[in-house]
Structures are given as structure tokens and as C-alpha cells.
Amino acid sequence: MDSRVIADLILHLGRIAAGDGLAGGLTPVQWAGLRFFARANRFSRTPSAFAAFHGTTRGTASQTVKGLVARGVLRQTRSKSDGRSVRLDLTAKGRAILAGDPIETLVRAADALPAGVRGDFSVTLQRMLGCVVSQTGKPFFGTCETCVHFEGGSCCQEGLPAHVCGFLNEPLMDEERNGLCINFASGKPGSPRTPGVCAGQQ
Ligand code: SF4
């Protein structure tokens, strides 16, 4: 298949799945923010990380965040160690709105794929994403499992964290391993990309 057709299909899928109106009363960019803060880990739930993920300016990202806080779907907490930085978390109202996410149609389409196809498709999309971010200079948001900073902790000892983030020297609980992270660094086997290189150029 022609590569341009594939690129068109991906764009078209994203556009029609996102819906055409104010689903749940949120604009498309507010939906992008809500999805990001639902998936990002605790180190990345900041306006600047959202700006980097969404490919927008910090000012624009801050406006989106302000709108979401004002609507009561995000809660803003100031850092105890650094009074200037904030963390954003979904409120119960935010989680309820997220349950009506218009991209559920796309989720169901992915669900309908055979398991093997879904796995291959996920790897393919990760490779394409890695290639695009390396060409555009955008950061790659990955998860702990394939990050070079992911270290084993005191696994299985009651009350102790299962893992540690070597970059931030912070404990990581099991349930935190799948959060998107702005500090992700590839390099482990199975890592979603080789920095700066697209597969076809290797
Ligand atoms: S191990 Fe990597 S992905 Fe996980 S929190 Fe640390 S820097 Fe982020």
C-alpha cells in the first residue's frame, strides 16, 4: 500500500473518531487534555508536560488546563517541595466525563481486531510515532517497562515499592508502570524506538 494512503488513513481515523462537536461539553483540545491527564504518570501531570505531549505552547496548554480546572474536571495541587510546580489530577466529575469519550468508537474498533493483529498494530504504531517524533524533535512519552531508568526495587516485600525510577530516584508502585512519562528514555530491548532513527533509514 502507498505510504501516503496509510498516513491519510491514520489522520482520517483520528479526525472522525474525535467527533465533530462539543462532546460532554468539552472542546477537542480539552478532550486531549483530559485524556492526557488520565494517562500520564504523577511526574508528568503538569501543564508543561501536556504542552510537550500535545505539541503546543505552554501558554496555550495553561489556558486549556485553566478551563478544565474551572469546569471541575481537573484538580490542581501545589507541590510540597516546590511551591511553584503544580500537579493535575482528574476529579470524579472528570472521570465520569471521560467515560463518555467519543473515541470509544475507535477503542471498540481496536477491540474487534484479533489479539495478534492488535499486538502487531500497536508495535507498528509505536514505531511510526517514534519515527515522527525523532523527525520533528518532539519528546517521546513512553512507559516504565521499556525505560532505561526503570529499576527493580524491593519486590514483594510488604509495604515497600516494587520498583524505582532511577532518573528521579522515586519509588514506583506496580500500578504506576503504565503511565505516560515525559522523562522516558529509550534504550532497553523492546523499547519503542531508536532515538533519531526511522526504521527505513537504518
Ligand atoms: S522509570 Fe522512566 S518512564 Fe518510569 S517514571 Fe522513571 S523516567 Fe519515567
Image (cartoon, rainbow, N blue to C red):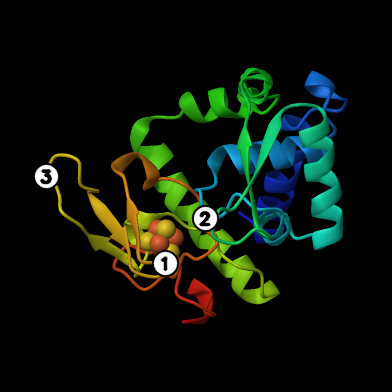
Report ligand 1 position as a quadrant: bottom left
Decide: is 53 above or below 139.
above
Residue 99: assigned label? none
Decide: is 175 above or below 96.
below
Secondary structure at badge 3 equals loop
Residue at 55% from the left image edge and 22% from the top image edge = 108
Q: Quadrant of the N terminus?
A: bottom right
Q: Is mark 1 within 8 Å of ligand 1?
A: yes
Look at mark 2 in the image and give the residue it sits on: 43
Look at mark 3 in the image and give the residue it sits on: 157
Q: Position of residue 85 (x, y in %)?
A: 65, 58
Q: Which residue lies most toward the left here?
A: 157
Q: Position of residue 31 (x, y in %)?
A: 74, 35
Other-residue count near label 2 (Cα within 10 Å), few / some / many at <14 / 14–19 / ≥20: some
Q: Is residue 64 left or right of residue 199?
A: right
Reading the chain from its start, which is encountered first: label 3 or label 1?
3
Q: Is mark 2 within 8 Å of ligand 1?
A: yes
Secondary structure at badge 2 equals loop
Amino acid under disc 2: Phe
Decide: is 84 above or below 74.
below
Look at mark 1 in the image and give the residue it sits on: 168
The Cα atoms of the two marked residues, 3 and 2, are separated by: 24 Å
Residue at 60% from the left image edge and 62% from the top image edge = 82
